[in-house]
Image: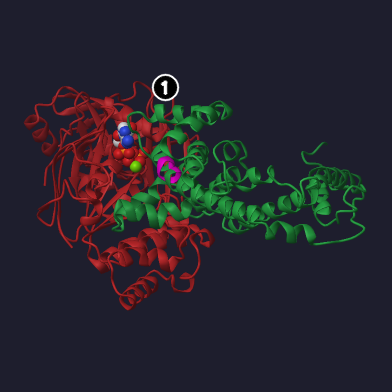
Chain colours: A red, B green
Amino acid sequence: MADIVLDKVTKRYPDGALAVREVDVEIADGEFIILVGPSGCGKSTTLNMIAGLEDITSGELRIGGERMNDRAPKDRDIAMVFQSYALYPHMTVRENMAFPLRLAKLDKQTVNRKVEEAARILDLTQHLDRRPANLSGGQRQRVAMGRAIVRSPKAFLMDEPLSNLDAKLRVQMRTEVSRLQKNLGTTTVYVTHDQTEAMTLGDRVVVLRGGEVQQVGAPQFLYEHPANLFVAGFIGSPAMNFLPARVEGDRLHTELGELPLTDRVRRLLEQAEAPRDVIMGVRPEHFEDAALVEEHARAGGAVYRGQVDVLESMGSDKYAYFSLGGERASSAQLEELAADAGVTDLPSGGGQLVTRLSAASQAREGERVEVWFDPDQVQLFDPNSGRNLTYQGG
Amino acid sequence: MAVIGGAETPARKAKWALLDVVVVVYALVPVLWIVSLSFKTKGTITDGNFVPREWTLDNYQEIFTTTEFVRALVNSIGIALIATLIAVVLGTMAAYAVARLDFPGKRALIGVSLLIAMFPQVSLVSPLFDIERALGLFDTWPGLILPYITFALPLAIYTLSAFFREIPWELEKAAKMDGATPAQAFLKVIAPLAAPGVFTTAILVFIFAWNDFLFAISLTSTERARTVPAALSFFTGASQFEDPTGTISAAAVVITIPIIVFVLFFQRRIVAGLTSGAVKG
Ligand SMILES: Nc1ncnc2c1ncn2[C@@H]1O[C@H](COP(=O)(O)OP(=O)(O)OP(=O)(O)O)[C@@H](O)[C@H]1O
Ligand SMILES: [Mg+2]
């Protein structure tokens, strides 16, 4: 076990593509850290540099205090789980898991003992003599995990290890990975596309965009205090609503009506020397059906009245979608997010508002309804730089 | 509605059966004819009967009592095996490099090897003859092994690199992460997966070397290195005026046996789809 330090690590591919730029992250011993970001943002590249499968162009990588830049992968004592699992098809499950131990020249008994122990932990005992081709996706995934844990390496690296599983299995394996990591206490770097995995698995999350770190922090912190539009839009599902807004004195003009600026927000805006035109972000879960909010609580909040476009009932909650007239918030960072999401989420024309209401809400599709929200939950962003103007660092 | 492949009607089956029979007969009649001839006695050899009226093993006895044939057989087996081994080992390494690495001159290498494969061998015989005379390679095993390797390598590289390209690269990365040196990763993970390709290539190269007549006849002059195809053309009967058809037939049958053995032996190892299950498919 060891800590991993990336010190201004940069990767430029031979064809000139700058994949990772000056990444500074300190990963503590035993920490579970998630690298997350849209496709092509350099997650795999970063992971491969830690693994030693890619050279580091500049900067330094230290594992357990030792400089690793020029060490071969086999001398770094870290294990990796690949997205494709990369099981050796000509070996049985047992041989697959024993492979790293045999290379380390352990004696037969120790190898057997360790393999069987790992198989027991991962519930693979009855499959030990089968070949990967005859296993289900979930079992293959577990074999890949087994091959990583048998040799008790200093760290685990995982590159989207669950993305090939179907949704249900993915949820199940997610808890299993989390439990395994807690029990073993091994430093883990986990790459994912999926923001739910990022939120649920990690001690800390590193959000990458175009090869640069956007923000590092605990999942809940990133959710509550995103440093910029990109992080705000990436973390959370469904995504945060973004609307153009204008600061006028102590009020905010928005598509949702005129909102009062709370003292806290006003002070932060002053400190940040905010422009007058901003982008307002509100999370869907910060809305509630106004009819369900008690009278005395309503006083401090704002109310938006609109016609429900689409209503999705999830059983525990209801999602009400409204279309807003006027402009959609525009910013380079938001466009990037939309491109990554495949744009399908975005309606053409004006903006859209997604709200999460209690299951008890009587809202119906096509009917007008009042939704209530707390203006103090609103986050304001600079449309040009994307910076969160209401950011409260921790 | 027409379905691709069609239904299994009796008429359809009969059509295919007929077609199969035609193909098999067409391919096997000359072979069976040779086998038949090899078992005929000297008196009945020209009777034109497909099934020998009198069976005899004389022809076989005769070829194995002459040193000429036995010696040629040893030469053939030795030369073909050595050439196959070297060509496959070199071909494997070259094909791996071609499939996996980007190195300067890769295109040139592929181009040149294609060129060698396409070059008419007959136009090289005279220069090779002179070169080998000068180098003292004429009428020796290396004198045949070297040209065989040269002409088999392009074929070997082509076949093998196709196999290497099929192997997921991540397996090699995984092996490295598991603590393997590049050599170990190649030997323990990549090579076993490329095995079907290696055996296929080995069969092709062996057959090429085994069947070669042109080099064998031009680059040898005595029993020292003469292989069976060349030796066959020097066969004579017991006396100068005797027709050697029977013995030639027997020798022809004998030299097909190693090929059949070689193919059957390696074919078992060519297990299709060995790489399935490496990655989620
Ligand atoms: N071998 C390579 N040569 C040149 N450029 C590369 C190479 N590998 C990756 N890149 C580039 O580097 C950038 C980062 O790639 P990387 O594979 O790290 O992305 P990623 O975040 O893992 O994406 P994904 O989520 O799709 O796996 C991309 O723009 C990609 O085009
Ligand atoms: Mg990737």
Q: Could you tell me which quadrant the N terminus of chain A lies in? A: bottom left
Question: Residue placed at 51% from the left, 36% from the top?
Answer: B151
Question: Residue placed at 42% from the left, 55% from the top?
Answer: A170
Q: Nearer the viewer, residue A250 or B53?
A: B53
Question: Residue placed at 61% from the left, 36% from the top?
Answer: B214
Magenta span includes A390: no
Magenta span: predominant SS is helix
Q: Chain of mark 1?
A: A
The residue carrying mark 1 is A349
Considering only vertical position in the picture, is A68 above or below A124? above
Q: Which residues are magenta?
A: B91-95
Image-based side of B67 in relation to B27, left or right: left
Q: Nearer the viewer, residue B69 or A54?
A: B69
Q: How many marks?
A: 1
Residue A189 visible in rendering: yes
Image-based side of B14 in relation to A325, left or right: right
Q: Position of residue A61 (x, y in %)?
A: 15, 47
Question: Dot 1: what SS?
Answer: loop
Mark 1 is on which residue type?
Gly
Q: Crowding at label 1, few (<14), some or many (≥20) Cα neighbours within 10 Å?
A: few
Q: Position of residue A158 (x, y in %)?
A: 31, 53
Q: Position of residue A341 (x, y in %)?
A: 39, 35
Q: Position of residue A289 (x, y in %)?
A: 37, 44
Residue B175 visible in rendering: no
Q: Nearer the viewer, residue B138 or B182?
A: B138
Task: Ligand 1: give its quadrant.
Answer: top left
- Dividing the picture into quadrants, the one containing residue B241 is top right
Q: Nearer the viewer, residue B183 or B221?
A: B221
